[in-house]
Every structure is written in C-alpha cells, then in structure tokens.
Image (cartoon, rainbow, N blue to C red):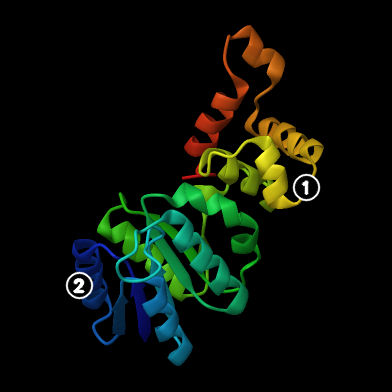
C-alpha cells in the first residue's frame, strides 16, 4: 500500500504519519508539504490513498491558503476519477465549493475534521481506502454555481465593486446583480426582511457566506 500525505504543519504531518504507520505498518507513506511537491509525486507514482489538508501552500515560501487546497483537489478529482482521497481539515465546510465534483467522483472519498478522535479518523481512512464514501459533513451544505462563487470571492476577498466584478467576469452589471439575488436566495436572505431588521443585506451576505465556508 502507498499513501501520499499532504500537510504543511510539521507537528500534524508527523503525528498523522506516525498514526498511519502504526495502523498500516507495511505501507509506504510519502510526506509532502506543498502542491508543487504533491504534483511531482503524483506524476511519478500511483497511490492507494491521497490524504490531504486543505490549507496548504502552492510551493515552499508561499502562504498556505484554503483555496490552494481546494484547487488542487478539484484538479485531482478531474484527472484521477478512480483515486481514493481523505481530506482532513479544520475547514471541511469549504468543500461545499466543489460538492458536485465530490458527489460525481468514482473513487473513495472521506472527510475528517481535525477535531475527530484518532480512532474515528482511522475509520474514515479505512472507508476511503476501500473505495467507499463518507461525506455527510457537507451533505447539507449549500450549493452555488461557479459564477456565483466567483462573485462572492471578487466582492469579499478582492474588495471589488459590482462594476469591477462585471468587467473582471466579462458580464454585464445586470448579470452581476442577478447573481447577487441568486446567492442571497440560496442563503435565505431577502431585502424586505433585512430592511425590517435594520440590517445591510450585503454585510449579511458576507457573514453567511463565510460561515457556510463559501469564501475564506
């Protein structure tokens, strides 16, 4: 058995490595800390399980970000439809951003919050290696279209106005306004309700989007 372990936190990397080694003493476990190193390993070897965190850096010397891990996972799901994955992270809600790809994946896929006990985490490792799934942590998550997520990211992570968002996305401002109404509908936010409560709907949209893991 061969396992690829991706995590940039040395203590967690070592702890997880030791736990997996105890459970699977004959396994060949490869440890990497960055997307660059992970892709190098995947290009030259096949793995029975890819065990990864979401908040990881692109390469050595760069800052670990959730989006980086999400993008890597999305890329791997598309390229390796039979690959088994276990995602262990404190930010599992962020996986709602690629829920469709996860649901369509043909290989094993399990999610483990870093707050789980060692035994429960090992149970989910076993599930993933067997090619089964354990994704209930995001089963009730919200689903937004990619362009809606892009609007949220540009508005609240990049600080762009609707005009600049429309230019960035090559859409009309009217289209962007429509995206906002769709996003707010999914979040259960409506202008009349916010107005009655004296709340700014844009601010409430940001608060809920972050809470649901739609943006960092």
Which structural element holds mark 2?
Answer: helix
Q: Is residue 163 visible?
A: yes
Q: What residue is shown at x 18% (from left), y 63% (from top)?
A: 11
> Residue 198: horizontal and vertical position, in percent?
58, 9
Q: What residue is shown at x 26% (from left), y 59% (from top)?
A: 118
Crowd tier of the residue under label 2, counting other residues whose Cα lies within 10 Å: few below 14, some 14–19, many 20 or above = some
> Residue 206: horizontal and vertical position, in percent?
54, 32
Q: Examine the rendered structure and indicate whether residue 2 appears above or below residue 132.
A: below
Say which quarter of the image contains residue 187: top right
User: Which numbered disc, 1 or 2, marks the residue closer to the eye?
Assistant: 1
Disc marking residue 55 = none
Q: Is residue 209 left or right of residue 6?
A: right
> Residue 216: horizontal and vertical position, in percent?
46, 45
Disc marking residue 171 = 1
Whichever of labels 1 and 2 marks the residue nearer the N terminus, that label is 2
Q: What residue is shown at x 32% (from left), y 53% (from top)?
A: 114
Say which quarter of the image contains residue 178: top right
Q: CA distance from mark 1 to mark 2?
A: 50 Å
Q: Nearer the viewer, residue 92 or 168?
A: 168
Q: How many marks?
A: 2
Q: Is residue 145 visible?
A: no
> Residue lying farthest bottom?
44
Q: Nearer the viewer, residue 17 or 38?
A: 38
Q: Which residue is mark 2?
A: 18
Of the 4 image quadrants, the one containing the N terminus is: bottom left
Q: Is residue 188 left or right of residue 133?
A: right
């Amino acid at each position: 058995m061969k396992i690829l372990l991706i995590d940039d936190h040395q203590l967690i990397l070592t702890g997880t490595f030791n736990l997996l080694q105890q459970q699977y003493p004959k396994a060949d476990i490869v440890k990497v800390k960055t997307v660059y190193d992970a892709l190098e390993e995947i290009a030259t070897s096949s793995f029975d399980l890819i065990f990864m965190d979401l908040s990881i850096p692109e390469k050595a010397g760069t800052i670990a970000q959730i989006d980086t891990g999400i993008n890597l996972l999305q890329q791997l799901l598309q390229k390796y439809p039979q690959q088994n994955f276990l995602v262990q992270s404190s930010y599992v809600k962020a996986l709602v951003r690629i829920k469709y790809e996860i649901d369509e994946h043909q290989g094993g896929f399990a999610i483990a919050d870093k707050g789980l006990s060692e035994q429960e985490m090992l149970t989910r490792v076993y599930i993933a290696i067997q090619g089964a799934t354990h994704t209930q942590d995001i089963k009730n998550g919200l689903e937004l279209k990619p362009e809606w997520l892009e609007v949220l990211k540009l508005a609240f992570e990049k600080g762009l106005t609707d005009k600049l968002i429309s230019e960035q996305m090559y859409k009309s401002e009217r289209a962007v306004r429509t995206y906002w109404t769709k996003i707010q509908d999914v979040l259960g936010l409506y202008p009349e309700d916010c107005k009655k409560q004296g709340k700014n709907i844009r601010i409430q949209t940001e608060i809920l989007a972050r809470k649901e893991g739609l943006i960092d």
